[in-house]
Amino acid sequence: MIPKYQSIMYATNLESCDQEVFRHALGVAKRYDAKVHVVHVIPEIEASHQQYVQYLVSMMGEEQLKELGENSNREMINKIQAELRVFADNELKDHPEAIKAVASIGVLHGHPAERILQRADEIDADLLVFGTHPQEEGSFDFLGSVVKRVLRRTRRPVLVIPVCT
Amino acid sequence: MLPEYRKILYATDLSQNARAAFKHAVSFAKTYQAKIYLVHVVPTLKLHDRELILASSGFGANVPDIISDEERLKAVTAEIVEKIRGRLARFAKEELGGNESDLDWLGGIEVLEGVSPTEEILSASERLNVDLLVFGSHSKGVLKQTFLGSVAEKVLERTCRPFLVVPLVD
């Protein structure tokens, strides 16, 4: 059986160089007539900041803080949507319809690799698309720790796009 | 512009997980009208490896005794390379489909010899100017973690070309 991709997960860190990665995700989606699920993970609050969160809860009340969180989620989704539109207008002039492959935009909170793996299960992704960013000379973290963790644990094919400058 | 893939380098260590990954390489090739290059690296033999190989298999049976160790080594390596090339050719034919036209997807079979498989794969990707590399990974152990394999991981750390990792699902 020759695999056909139907559900592609594109994990973004919202850096501008990620456009190249998104281009690959959309390109594969267009060729295979697949859906693209965009995911962005906001890392969980570090333990050292927990005390600060407790303080906020005591000051604002849990309800208000939750609302604040939901608002910032919405803002983040709006921001990604706006960026995708700009990207489609500027970069996809020859294939403006390709952007329609985007089926969902998810902003998640927590441990990035965990959330990405979980989201991949939810949408039953048959291809994950990630970017990696070369860092300073001599750095050993070329791959990025999140991508490494996901590669180590997923049973799904992963397309890695190095964004080399 | 959306990216196109025209040349795909499929790196195989001849294992089962590499076999699973090939199906994905074929999928990309057929979808993008691309060519697949099968690449396998035979590690450079050292003299004592040769003795082992001679002792455990029929390799080198036709190599006359009168030539030097260097030449014997070369002859044995050439034999191994040819054998693997034949095996990869059969594998490609099997996997691509029975029809002659299915072999159009095959760009070439490269059995390379080198000290470092990572270096050989990287330089083959440059030389062939591929726009996608495909590797298999496999899961093992109680934790069922997937292991990329040290060669794949090293290549991935150094290449600037798109890279598809296909875990073997058992």
Image (cartoon, rainbow, N blue to C red):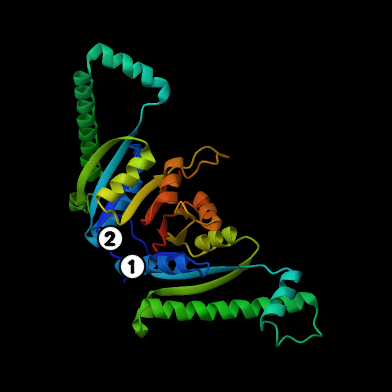
C-alpha gap between disc 1 and disc 2: 9 Å
Could you tell me residue A142's position as x and y percent?
50, 43
Residue in the picture at 40% in, 70% down: B35
Q: Is residue A95 visible?
A: yes
Residue in the picture at 60% in, 76% down: B81
Residue pointed to by mark 2? A5
Q: Label 2: state its secondary structure.
A: loop
Total marks shown come to 2
Amino acid at circle 2: Tyr
Residue pointed to by mark 1? B27
Q: Chain of mark 1?
A: B
Residue B94 in the figure: left or right of residue B151: left
The N terminus of chain A lies in quadrant: bottom left
Q: Disc 1, disc 2: CB below 8 Å?
A: yes
Amino acid at circle 1: Ser
Which quadrant of the figure has residue A156? Answer: bottom left
Packing grade of label 1 (10 A; few <14, some 14-19, many >=20) is some
Residue in the picture at 42% in, 62% down: B168
Q: Chain of mark 2?
A: A
Q: Label 1: state its secondary structure.
A: helix
Instruction: Residue A40: give its label.
Output: none
